[in-house]
Image (spheres, rainbow, N blue to C red):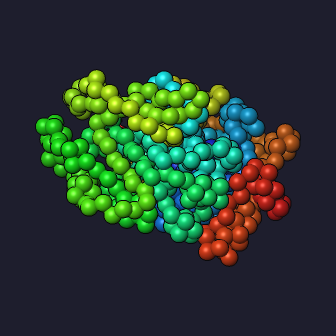
Amino acid sequence: MTSTRSDLRVAVIGSGPAGFYAADALLKSESPTVEVDLLDRLPTPWGLVRLGVAPDHENIKAVSRAFEKTAARPGFRFFGNVEVGSTVSHAELAALYDAVVYTVGAQTDRRLNIPGEDLPGSWPATAFVAWYNGHPDFQGLGFDLNTERVVVVGNGNVAIDCARMLALTAGELASTDTVDDAAEAIVRSPVEEILMLGRRGPVQAAFTPPELKELGELAGAEPVVDPADLVLDPASEAELEADRERARRNVDLLHEYAAREPEGKPRRIVLRFLVSPMAILGEERVEGVEIVHNELVEEDGRIVARPTGELETIPCGLVLRSVGYRGVPIDGVPFDERSGTIPNDRGRVEGAERTYAAGWIKRGPSGVIGTNKKDAAETVELLLEDARAGRLAAPGRDGDLAELLAEKRAHAVEYEGWQAIDMAEKAAGEPLGRPRVKLTSWEKLLHAGSKITR
Ligand code: NAP
């Protein structure tokens, strides 16, 4: 189908929340009218809603219903299994479309840069999350959960997700779409302690109260907090006083956990603060973590952790490094190595015409799903402003992505193909009382996604 009915044709690259919110805002525009092709390197849409949000957070995943409504709007097309940089280039897209919007998220992890980081048994949390969520690039990784203690480095919501997932019982996992290998490994694991390490104090923790609260409501695990860790230094006291709703509620919950009598549940989630990993220890694989105790100091108006020199060794068999995601560059598109984002001014990419960015690749990996709605709206507003001002006059704009892909013998999974995958997964989950059983290999996804041809 060559599209000619609309004033504007826009390619949005990356079909996570930012991509869908950008597509939605574009498709709602009446002047100019817009058609949107949403591309993804995976055969499946929804980005981290499918492959990042924890499987036991089905209510958060329900945001995908809004994305389905966007996909049903006239002028929307999906091209899965199309990677910009390999299947098609940015230059090819720039020739086909009036504008290109990058919403590719942050596809890798930040590093700790400490000795032993790459020992077997030391994993980025991003890989663990992708594994239990069925990402086809992260299956068969051989996560070995045969250990009594797992250390999770970091104090964000991803660290909490990993800690909680490791603590779920067979009963809690049964109604989720956690992949079978991961669910079995979690249930069979002899893990007794999941230890979360925060480099700063409880007031500075990045996790949010609802997520922290869930740690206190698990069937087979209980949170453990040392009251001594909750004694605040004056700067943290002042920060807490300055009406930070999140910090206040977090600290209240942590006090509640510290006061709890142990219930003797099989697993403990221990939250420690003011400690940083200095090295991951082990000969052939992870055997422990060396940590240093920190104190908090103010630097340029920010409270930062400074090592005191007091060291401690913690034996463990698995380390999950959960210190944030990081964007990766795309060939032909400007990239700022320092921030791991595409350099931009409110979404207009600097140094590339008719090119825009939204979501984590625009502002860095922060905020919740809904944050991307406002973020994408800002970008789309500027894009439409540029269109109205005649700044998007594309040089060519003939041809169609479908024709280009056919020439290249590239097989895209279109929206109907994704719907076939979706139906197959839901049908497999239904008799088990699960929302879906995910297809976890490229082969199976492409097979299911190619059953429907246009
Ligand atoms: P995050 O919220 O930025 O947390 C990263 C954590 O890593 C912070 O505690 C940070 O501490 C720590 N850290 C960074 N460098 C470190 C180092 N070298 N050593 C020790 N600790 C270090 O990132 P995230 O957990 O990956 O989450 C990303 C975004 O997704 C967040 O906005 C999060 O809220 C969101 N998310 C939400 C949910 C949910 O709503 N349920 C679930 C998952 C993710 P400092 O503060 O000291 O830098």
Determine the residue positioned at 69% across, 46% down: 140
Indicate left or right for 223 with 146 as reference.
left
Indicate left or right for 43 with 18 as reference.
right
Q: Is residue 75 visible?
A: no
Determine the residue positioned at 55% across, 53% down: 189
Position of residue 48 measured from the top left corner of the image (x, y, whole percent) = 55, 51
Position of residue 21 measured from the top left corner of the image (x, y, whole percent) = 52, 54
Give the quadrant of residue 126: top right
Indicate left or right for 99 with 25 as reference.
right
Front residue (pair 343, 58)? 58
Front residue (pair 446, 211)? 211
Q: Is residue 255 visible?
A: yes
Quarter of the figure with the N terminus: bottom right
Q: Quadrant of ligand 1?
A: top left
Give the quadrant of residue 67: bottom right
Determine the residue positioned at 57% across, 68% down: 174
- Above or below — where is 407 with respect to 351? below
Position of residue 30 measured from the top left corner of the image (x, y, whole percent) = 55, 57
Front residue (pair 50, 170)? 170
Front residue (pair 332, 176)? 176
Determine the residue positioned at 37% across, 65% down: 217
Indicate left or right for 211 with 310 as reference.
right
Position of residue 341 measured from the top left corner of the image (x, y, whole percent) = 50, 32
Quarter of the figure with the C terminus: bottom right
